[in-house]
Image (cartoon, rainbow, N blue to C red):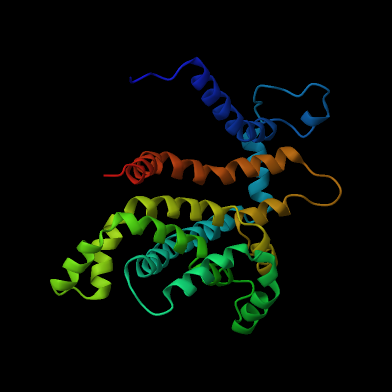
Amino acid sequence: MNRRPGFLVYGLLTAFVLGSCAPLYWSFLVGSHSREVLTKRVPPLLPGGHFWDNAQRAIDAVPFWKAMFNSLIVSGTVATSVVFFSTLAGFAFAKLSFRGRTPMLVFVVATLAVPTQLGVIPLFIVMAKLGWVGSVWALIVPSLVTAFGVFFMRQYLLDAVPDELVDAARVDGCSLFRTFWTVALPAARPAAGILWLFTFMATWTDFFWPLIVLPASNPTVQIALQQLQSGYYVDYSLVLAGATLSTVPLLVLFVLTGRQMVAGIMQGAVKG
């Protein structure tokens, strides 16, 4: 029988949506009031009329638009590169037979267990030798491909691309790269879209590595928000107004790609 979701299901979904939106609403709420709002015993529940004033102060206090541009360039480039190289490597691991395939895949997966912080010092030395400290290249180049992306695309391509389809393309005279480009890449589009979106979001919100390699004059969005906190006093109206502005590109991205992302998830979930 095809049963419709009941009251409990809708109640849980509503609670989950409200809980997910609560931090964003709180940021906008505090950012729309004056700096004295948090000193009140009972915090306000409705937005005030000072959001644009606080947002303008945040933009004037730090190189905000330059930070937004840097984050867009870095996040977009890294996400596109990760999708391409991860799909290429995932296709090789999933559909090609070569010596050492299994040990190499095990090594790639094992790198997921290594904390990122362990490689910060040697990575910084390499970036310094190349003269990229202080440049967005220090953020882009080390993140051109990820182990998670390779494993994710490999698992998806195992079932999404039949071996017979690859063999047929090779028999018809396609080169190996053309087989990947015309057969594997279109089939991997749903998973590639999800990987692109998640990689973009993770790169946009990254704070640790940009804090190390970028100066205050050439920040990303997260570093610019950190610069709004100065001394022993934090103006939360200023900081949260800037934080709300920094989430606008992500919200726009989710609105524009939400339908395609859900379709990709559903397409990847249906077998047969």
**Residue beneath the point at 38% across and 55% down:** 156
**Residue beneath the point at 61% across and 40% down:** 244
- Determine which quarter of the picture holds residue 142: bottom right
Vertical relation: 70 (above or below) 194: below
The single residue placed furthest to the right in the displayed view is 232
- Determine which quarter of the picture holds residue 215: bottom right
Across and down, in percent, residue 38 comes to 79, 31
Across and down, in percent, residue 89 comes to 40, 69
Side of 239 where 181 appears, left or right = left
Seen from the viewer's position, the closer of residues 137 and 152 is: 152
Seen from the viewer's position, the closer of residues 68 and 127 is: 127
The single residue placed furthest to the left in the displayed view is 172
Across and down, in percent, residue 226 comes to 71, 53
The single residue placed furthest to the top in the displayed view is 7
For the C terminus, the image quarter is: top left
- Determine which quarter of the picture holds residue 171: bottom left
The number of discs equals 0
**Residue beneath the point at 23% across and 71% down:** 178
Side of 54 where 138 appears, left or right = left
Side of 30 where 164 appears, left or right = left
Seen from the viewer's position, the closer of residues 101 and 58 is: 101
Vertical relation: 268 (above or below) 99: above
Vertical relation: 224 (above or below) 141: above
Across and down, in percent, residue 260 comes to 35, 43
For the N terminus, the image quarter is: top left
